[in-house]
Amino acid sequence: MSTSTEHTDDPVSIVRPEQPSRMELESVPDRRLLFDLVLVALWVAATDWLIYRLNTYTSWAIFFALATILFGTISCWRQRIRFSALLATLLFAVAVKLIWCGSGLQVACGILLSVVLAMYAAGMQPFLPELASAVFCVFLGGVNRVSRYALFRRKSSRTNGLSRIGVAFLLPIFLVFAFASIFVLANPELADQALERWHSGIAALQNLITHMEPTQLLFWTASAWILIGLLYPALLKTFPERDEQISSSQPAMMYSAYRNSLFSLVSLFAIYLVFEFATLWGREFPEDFYYAGYAHQGAFWLTVALAMTTALLCIIFRGSTLADPRLKRLKWLAMFWAIENFVLALAVYHRLFIYIEFNGMTRMRVIGLLGTSCVVAGLIWALIKIRNSRGFVWLLHRQAWVPAVAVIIYAILPVDWLVHRYNVWSVQSGKPAAVVQIVAHPSSAEGMLPLFELIDATNPIMRDGIRAMLALWAQELQLDDDIESTTQAWRREQRWRSPYEHTTPWIGLPEGFSGRSANVQEERWYQVQLAESQLHKQLNEHRSKWIEFAQSPARRDKAIDDFYRFAYQWY
């Protein structure tokens, strides 16, 4: 097992003991103890306010920004800058997306990145397979650190008078407070303001103590323990990365089977790629072309073939095969097969874009593009492993990050905005089939923003349908007092459905304000979602175009129904 430890005396360095016994533990130095106490107090206060009390997307964004600053600073102090800069950038991007248009996915990605950044700041290698054991090390690290605090207390109790920590830190604080109070008392207006804030603070403290809940106290304890464990984790044992060992050159028993298999697969892939390019590239598709079968299901199965290639290459180039004197021939065959797989990956992308070209972009098609990219990246890592004779653990450590990075990229990107930006562009370019994706799938506020470009569409069915759907959102947001009575009546009705039994995704806010008030005008700063704020602005600017549909539910429903009928001819 590979390990690494560093012991320094600076207050932000991370101590990871070599599993000492209880009697071998040393008490925490004075300034380190003070640093820990101040940092834990600030951390608990921040998490209590941002997570336990507010718990909105914006408050989570602020928390992740603070975590970036804390663990990024520790990484810089320990001169672990390169990878920590990348992690901090990703975490900051997640925080920005939470303020723009947040969801639970960004919160989950932010928590993952925060833990990984803390692991790296503590001197660990940020490998995802060891993440589960790292969580256990966080708990043990907290136990060890608290034990050292207890030793400090016993040591201090045996000394007479004030300890050095009181002399070094508490006395300056007391003197500054005393002189600051004198300066405040010398200014009557300032003294009145200070007294008022003092009473407010005492009242807030009394209210906090009076309304203290057991769950809140438990949250404080867990929050403090997690921070201590992240700063001072116990020793983490990682899976060792060993290169493939070649003891002596000798023929491998499976060489002939592997060679014949690779030659056969190279031939099969060559024949299939000719068929793929002949049937799906550079041709006009008939009206009854099975887009879902070729571009959706077909792309999935070709992606499975790419994944199988990666697994098979890893199985072939290991163990006794690497000691075979004819290995070079086998690598040439693998190289040709890998090239064919990259061409096959282009075919997968082409199939996906055939579907996108036919009737627009969706979230799932974005996921399909990212998923295919993951498989291609996995194949590249496998080829690097083969070329450099790396071991399986080396490959596992890097391949585990591939899907994780894909999920983080998906969480960071304004996917709904990109999806409907493309669909609107397709409609404006004379490809009306993309309009079906506007009515067939739910969207967040950021996805609605590009649709205002269709509010004056030349097609009357499309124009009225867009305006009616915007009216539904305005009603849900209670944007205007003039339509409040209509909104309340509409809320008592069942969710509107098209004749095709599709519930309109425009009713409700699937990714809106967390804990917002009924009237959007009463939103507070910690409830703000910039995409929804921009949506409110656009709705107000175009109010004259959708208000008639908000005031006439019958006309609104008919316009949406006609829009569904028009769009679903391309479903």
Image (cartoon, grey):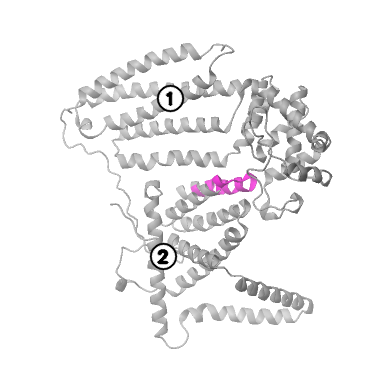
Which quadrant of the structure image shows residue 560? top right
Where does the image place residue 414, in percent across and percent down from the top left?
A: 61, 38
Against 282, residue 461 (above or below) is below
Question: Along the horizontal axis of the image, is 198 left or right of 87?
Answer: right
Which residue shows up at 52% across the image and 33% down it? 367
The percent position of residue 378, horizontal first and vertical second, equals: 40, 34
Q: Indicate whether 187 appears above or below 7.
A: below
SS for dot 1? helix
Please indicate whether residue 516 sits to the left or right of residue 36 in the image. right
For mark 2, does the 10 Å Cα neighbourhood hold few (<14), some (14 to 19), or many (20 or more) residues?
Answer: many
Query: Is 16 on the left-hand or right-hand side of 102?
Result: left
Is 276 colored magenta in this rendering? Answer: no
Per the rendered image, the range of residues in magenta is 87-106
Q: Where residue 355 sits in the image (x, y, percent)?
A: 56, 22
Question: Which tag, 1 or 2, sits closer to the chain's start?
Answer: 2
Which of the two residues, 451 or 405, is positioned nearer the viewer here? 451
Residue 61 is situated, as x and y percent measured from the top left of the image, at: 59, 52
Q: Which mark is residue 301?
A: 1
| Residue 561 visible to the viewer | yes
The mark found on residue 376 in the picture is none
Q: Residue furthest bottom?
A: 160
Mark 2 sits on what residue? 142
Q: Nearer the viewer, mark 1 or mark 2?
A: 1
Residue type indicated by callout 1: Trp
Query: In the rendered image, is residue 15 in sight?
Result: no
Residue toward you, 217 or 456: 217
Predominant secondary structure, magenta span: helix
